[in-house]
Image (tube, rainbow, N blue to C red):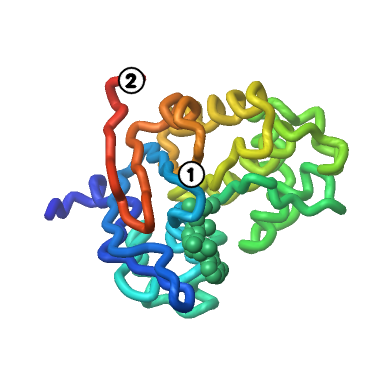
Amino acid sequence: MNSDASTEPVVRLSAVRKEYGDSVALDGVDLEIRPGEAVAVMGPSGSGKSTLLNLVAGLDRPSSGTVVVHGDDLGTLNEKGLALFRRRRIGMIFQFFNLLDDLPALDNVALAAQLTGTPAAQARRRALELLDELGIAGRRNTYPAQLSGGERQRVAVARALMNRPALLLADEPTGALDSRAGEQVMDLLLDLNQIGQTLLLVTHDERLATRCASRLIEVVDGRVARERSLESAQ
Ligand code: ADP
Ligand code: MG
C-alpha cells in the first residue's frame, strides 16, 4: 500500500455488491481511480453502470462492501453527511441534464454553490466565469427550454464544476445529443481531464469513450468483465 497522499486513489471500491430485492445489480466490484485519471465504464444496458456511479456519488448505498471517495468512507456517513459529501466532493452530469426549467442558465449554475453556503454574489461571479470558460456566457440569461441540447449539457457541466469537485461523474452525458454536440461535450470533458479533473464516465459509445478516457472498464452482469488502458492512445 502506497502511503503517499498524492497517490491515494480518489475512488476505491472494495467487494461492492448491490441488490435490489432479489436481483443483483453489482456483484463484487473492486475499482480504484487515481487522481487525474479519466475512466470510462461501458457495458450492456442493465449491467450495473448507473448503479456503480450512484454508489460512488453517494446517491445510494451498497448492500455490502466499501466505497471510499476522496478519503471519505461513505458507509460511515449518515444521510446529512452524504448530502454534504455530494455537494462538496462530487460533480455529476446526466443524460437528460437535470437542469431546473424555471431558472436561467446562470442561476442553474450558481445555485450549486449557494447550496454549500457561498454568498449569492460570489456564486454568480464564479458561475459566469465557468459559463465563459465553457463558451456559453452569452446564454447566461436563457432558460433551459430555449437552449440546444449541447448548450444544456454545457450548463450542466458548469454546474457540476462549481464546487471544484474531487471527482466529476457523468452518466451517458452524450446519450441525448446529436453526434456533433456529443463530440463537443466529450472534448470538453477531455479538456477538463487534461487540466487535472478526475473523471468517471459511463457511455455506450466506444468511439467517444476512447476519445477522452485513459482507462476503459467493461461491466457485464454486475461484474467488471474487462479492463483496458488507453493511455497510449492520446
Ligand atoms: P445500466 O446503467 O448499466 O443500464 P443499472 O445500473 O441502471 O444498469 O441497472 C442494473 C440492474 O439493477 C438492472 O437490472 C436494473 O433493473 C436494476 N436496478 C437499478 N436501479 C434499480 C432500482 N432503483 N430498483 C430496482 N432495480 C434497480
Ligand atoms: Mg444506466
Residue found at x 86% / y 38% = 142
Residue found at x 47% / y 43% = 201
Along the polypeptide, which appears first: circle 1 or circle 2? Answer: 1
- Which quadrant of the view contains residue 218? top left
Q: Is residue 100 left or right of residue 218?
A: right
> In this view of the protein, which residue sits in the foreground, 233 or 3?
233
- The residue pinned by badge 2 equals 233
SS for dot 1: strand
Tally of numbered discs: 2
Q: Residues within 10 Å of mark 1 (few under 14, many from 20)?
A: many
- The residue pinned by badge 1 equals 202
Q: Position of residue 88 (x, y in %)?
A: 52, 59
> In this view of the protein, which residue sits in the foreground, 30 or 87?
30
Q: Position of residue 232 (x, y in %)?
A: 28, 21
Q: Is residue 2 left or right of residue 11?
A: left
Q: Is residue 114 left or right of residue 207?
A: right
SS for dot 2: helix
The three-letter code of the residue at mark 1 reads Val
Q: Is residue 171 left or right of residue 99?
A: left
Q: Within 8 Å of ligand 1, the CB of disc 2?
A: no
Residue found at x 62% / y 62% = 116
The three-letter code of the residue at mark 2 reads Ala
